[in-house]
Amino acid sequence: MQIDKKDIRSLSKEQLRDFFVSNSDKSFRGNQVYEWLWSKGAHHFDDMTNLSKETRAMLSDNFVINHIKVDTMQRSEDGTVKNAVRLHDGLVVESVLIPTNTRTTACVSSQVGCSLDCNFCATAKLKRMRNLEPAEIYDQVLAIDKESRLYYNHPLSNIVFMGMGEPLMNYNNVIKAIDMITSTEGLGMSPKRITVSTSGVPKMIKKLADDEVKFKLAVSLHSAIDEIRFKIMPFTVNFPLAELRESLEYWYYKTKSKITYEYVVWKDINDNKESIDALVKFCKYVPCKVNLIEYNPIDDGEFQQASEQSINAYIKALESYGIVAKVRRSRGKDIDAACGQLANKEA
């Protein structure tokens, strides 16, 4: 009977050092392996060329490296790149490289499928199959960083957790991945260049604040009226706006970090004065900015993009109260890489 080997990247540097000592080797070998796994992104023990063949064979006998594999890569007319990422157990998630004139942003996934049930999102229709491990999240970033250097001649500049899944429902693994991404022993990225987007889980937003995280927070709001929000995001029945507001006030009190609200305007759903007034009122509670996001249909026709006139009405109202509001045009629509469209169609 074959025993499943442990993924070596689940071990800390100290545990790796202890492993070598317990196998009559020098503890610094653990440092070397740790560097290969994280800083150098090695996916195979044979890549670790400063270790002897015997040492590499010992590692192979005891561990595996459950690395991702980019199954297919699609490039959009606008330069966006979408990766279908196959995990070690055969499941697939998607991640996206979004270029602009000044930077490249990685949009990464945190779950296979999603824990939540937003009616306008293709990923939510998949349901959650499992959480991603920290190394699987890290690997997505590493792959996109390589693509950024290859296609755009500079390293990855920003990361958004806006791919498949609800990051705060995979809290520990997401935090561990970000710790490694920002570590000098990992990719060394500034946490200020990382944004975690949540659909709004108040208890976990408070935990982020208590844990004194340094990255930015974005909230998929889409309506500041409970009845409308319940219809488009049914899970929010358990997290009404009053609770969300309280958690965001707590976040700002603890972190002094401005919040970004992501907000899609849909025809005949929230393209009315009542919805605009409610959003303006909600934005007054905590320092924030609003990204009005272009909607990308996911084929059922229930949700339709609102008119430019409706979007402009939102901008005018928000700006009249000094609230920064921008329209975010979708990227990668021709390859189903835009916001809300990630759904493993290549799997």
Image (cartoon, rainbow, N blue to C red):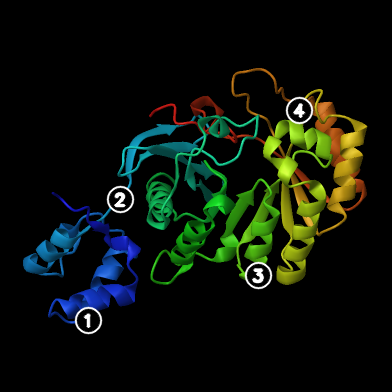
| Label 3 environment density (alpha carbons within 10 Å; few <14, some 14–19, many ≥20) | few
Q: In the rendered structure, find residue 27 and report the number of the disc placed on it.
A: 1
Q: CA distance from mark 3 to mark 4?
A: 35 Å
Position of 158 compared to 218: left or right?
A: left
Tell me, for residue 266, which label it has, or none.
4
Which amino acid, mark 2? His
Q: Looking at the picture, which amino acid does disc 4 mark?
A: Trp
Residue linked to disc 2 = 67
In this rendering, would 105 be left or right of 321?
Answer: left
- How many callouts does the rendering have? 4
Q: Earlier in the sequence, mark 1 or mark 3?
A: 1
Q: Counting residues from the N terminus, which is met first, the one under dot 1 or under dot 4? A: 1
Looking at this view, name the residue that lies furthest to the front.
1
Structural distance between the alpha carbons of marks 2 and 3: 32 Å
SS of the residue under disc 1? loop
Q: Secondary structure at mark 4?
A: loop
Type of residue at label 3? Asp
Residue for badge 3: 210
User: What is the crowding at mark 1: few (fewer than 14 residues within 10 Å), some, or many (at least 20)?
Assistant: some
Depth order, front residue of 335/263: 263
Q: Earlier in the sequence, mark 3 or mark 4?
A: 3
